[in-house]
Amino acid sequence: MVYASTDKFRQNRKKSFRGHNNAGYAIDLDISPDGQFLVSGDSGGFVCFWSWRGCKMYHKMQASEGPVTCVGWHPQESSKVVTGALDGLIKFWD
């Protein structure tokens, strides 16, 4: 699927999510199905959860020994997240 748009994209300077490291890795992020939370991987093996509205980090948990490069919410249940790390582990969190 290719998306082409003539609209111009601009940065929302009011949204800044700080507290995770990428250290040269392509780190994935995802927004919860209800649009309230954002989840991101981390080069230190952590998974970070933020409030979308307030940009406040709610939780940071250790998910792997290596960098967590892939994260995703369950499409119907916002309490479930899947993570993938460079050490080859895929974990399903509830």
Image: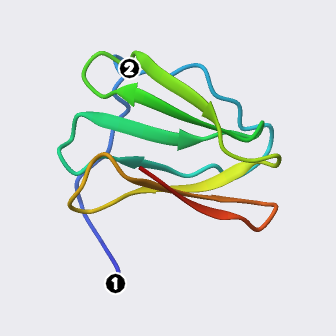
Is 61 displayed left or right of 66 in the figure? left
Give amino acid for label 2: Arg
Tell me the residue that label 2 is attached to.
13
| Element under disc 1 | loop
Q: Which residue does the image show at 22% across and 53% down from the upper left?
A: 7
Where does the image place residue 51, in percent across and percent down from the top left? Answer: 33, 24
SS under mark 2? loop
* Residue 80 relative to residue 44: left or right: left
| Residue type of the residue flagged with mark 1 | Met
CA gap, disc 2 and disc 1:
29 Å
Indicate the position of residue 82 as horizontal and vertical percent values: 49, 58
Q: Which label is found at residue 30?
A: none
For residue 72, which quarter of the picture? bottom left
**Residue farthest front in this picture:** 94
Mark 1 burial class by Cα count in 10 Å: few <14, some 14-19, many 20+:
few
Q: Nearer the viewer, residue 44 or 3?
A: 44
| Above or below: residue 72 compared with residue 4 | above
Which residue is painted at 30% across and 71% down in the image?
4
Judge by depth and name the residue closer to the eye, 34 or 81. 81
- Vertical arrangement, residue 83 with respect to residue 88, above or below: above
Instruction: Answer above or below: position of 77 versus 58.
Output: below
Residue at mark 1: 1
Q: Nearer the viewer, residue 22 or 63?
A: 63
Give residue 54's quadrant in the image: top left
Q: Position of residue 55 (x, y in %)?
A: 37, 19
* For residue 40, side relative to residue 33 (left or right): right
The residue under the point 75% across, 49% down is: 25
